[in-house]
Amino acid sequence: MDYRIKFLKNAFWNLLQFVWPIVLSLIATPYIVKKLGADLYGIFSLVSVTLGFFALLDLGLSTATVKYVAEFLGKRKWEKINEIVNINLFAYGFLGLLGAIIILTFSKFLAVPLLKIPPQFASLARFCFYIAAGGFFVNFLSATFRSLAPGLQRYDVPSKINIVGGTLNVVTNVLLLYFGYSLQEIVIFNLLFSLAYFFIYYHQARRLLPSLKLQLQFKKNIFFMLFNYGILTFFAKTFGVIVAHLDKFLISGILGLNWVAFYVIPSNLTSKINGFVGAMEDVIFPTLSEFAGKGEAEKAQRVYKELMRLSLFLGLSLCLPIWALGDKFLLFWLGGEFAAKSTLVLYWLVGTSFLLIFGNPAWNVLLASGYPFQAAFFSGFMAILDIVLLFILAPIYGVTGAGMAYFLSVLIGNSLLVFFVERKILKLDGAYFFKFLSKSFILAVFIFIEAMIFKKLAVNIFTTIFLMGLLFFSYWILFVSFGMYTEEDKQLVKTLFKKFLK
């Protein structure tokens, strides 16, 4: 029961960390854009994108750190955790310095002509990239200590730091613009925030791990343990990015630029579903790593089953309202032409989101159990399959074919992944999920019947959103009414309720 409470606590904070920046962005971005103007905001955005791109230099070390810190935590090998931190200080310092040098070189020789920055903003753009290079180095040093808390199964610590720090950062940017300052001052203050993050993360690392000692030592066995695991997870995540984003470029090349928007907007909408559920479920990764390190297979099976139930429940409750009323939503939100061209795309991509949610527990087990090569293989397989199917289906079915290609690649890839994890790693027969999945789809039929009855009431964007929310909560009610919760679920609710009353 303890890990379930810990999971819900970590899931809450990780989810809040996912949602809060979106809320901040919706509130602050219009004002920032208005005060900076299109050109300066464009430079600000390009600097942010560049930092995000070079963040790939992490090479999977953060994931490797979380895994092995969790394993050593379960075995109470504090000296090994200390060695990981010291190795990361070397590794992240080197990678951060390398990234900073690349950014400085890029900004000096390539940024202005390549990005077509107007001549009057050239010196300002270079200054922003120079400051960003310093921030990049500091951020990488911070990662030495930032990855420690999730490995110790304390997602609340970095979440609180990021939520408070991110809010102060945005507020500071708004206040600087309000008092007449501009982009130059914003990037300087962002660097100062990066420095503050470094010291805060270091302080929290010392608090969470009192035995932490920073030493000038380099143990090759620890480094290669982290690197060999991290580089494969890096490739797995890179292939995942390719699957999620390359199709937009291919659509432009195959169908023309004017078709990209009809795919991108449904894609952006449905990706939020994956991000929402992923923010909740991914916090179980260190727990699974701890069980794997201690050889506790039965506990890993139990966690996987519960994650699968949660995935099916959340996936269907979030996706069903969009399947049922997605056409109405697009019609009232973006107009008749957009709805006519994007509705089928939306349906295919919602199906893809459900499959990605369904496969998420298997991905966590695969990585936590020490199978990064297989993770890279499955991810690469889906990327290649998606590209091949897109070239076949898009010329025939247009932008809808691109959605079909993504759906089919994930359907085939995730099915093979789940089969491998259940049979080869967890030694499950799959009968449990067949029964649960059957009940889940019976509930889905009831939701669709309800949707068909009330669909005529969707006469504008507000009534449509209200009805989608109604369908969402209807699935919750049916879930409880059909007895699809377990005795442990009831005990968990009671425990949480008691904690809340204290």
Image (spheres, rainbow, N blue to C red):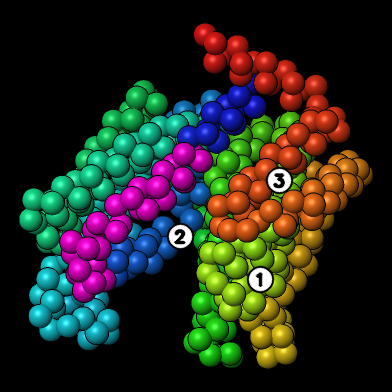
Magenta segment main secondary structure: helix
**Front-most of residues 319 and 498:** 319
Magenta highlight range: 14-43
- Residue 442 can be seen, yes or no: yes
Taking the spot 65% from the left edge, 50% from the top edge, the residue there is 468
Q: Is residue 485 left or right of residue 337?
A: right
- Where residue 382 sits, quadrant-wise, is bottom right
Mark 3 touches mark 1? (CB < 8 Å): no
* Closer-to-camera residue (372/436): 436
For the residue pair 493 and 361, the one nearer the viewer reads as 493
Give yes or no for residue 36 being in the magenta stretch.
yes
Amino acid carrying label 3: it is: Leu
Badge number at residue 471: 3
Disc 1: which residue: 343
Residue that mark 2 sits on: 59
For label 1, count other residues whose C-alpha is less than 10 Å away and answer few (under 14), some (14-19) or many (20+): many
| Residue 257 image label | none
Q: Residue at x 74, y 40 (%)?
A: 474
Residue type highlighted by circle 2: Leu
Q: Is residue 456 above or below residue 284?
A: below
Does the rendering let one see residue 47? no
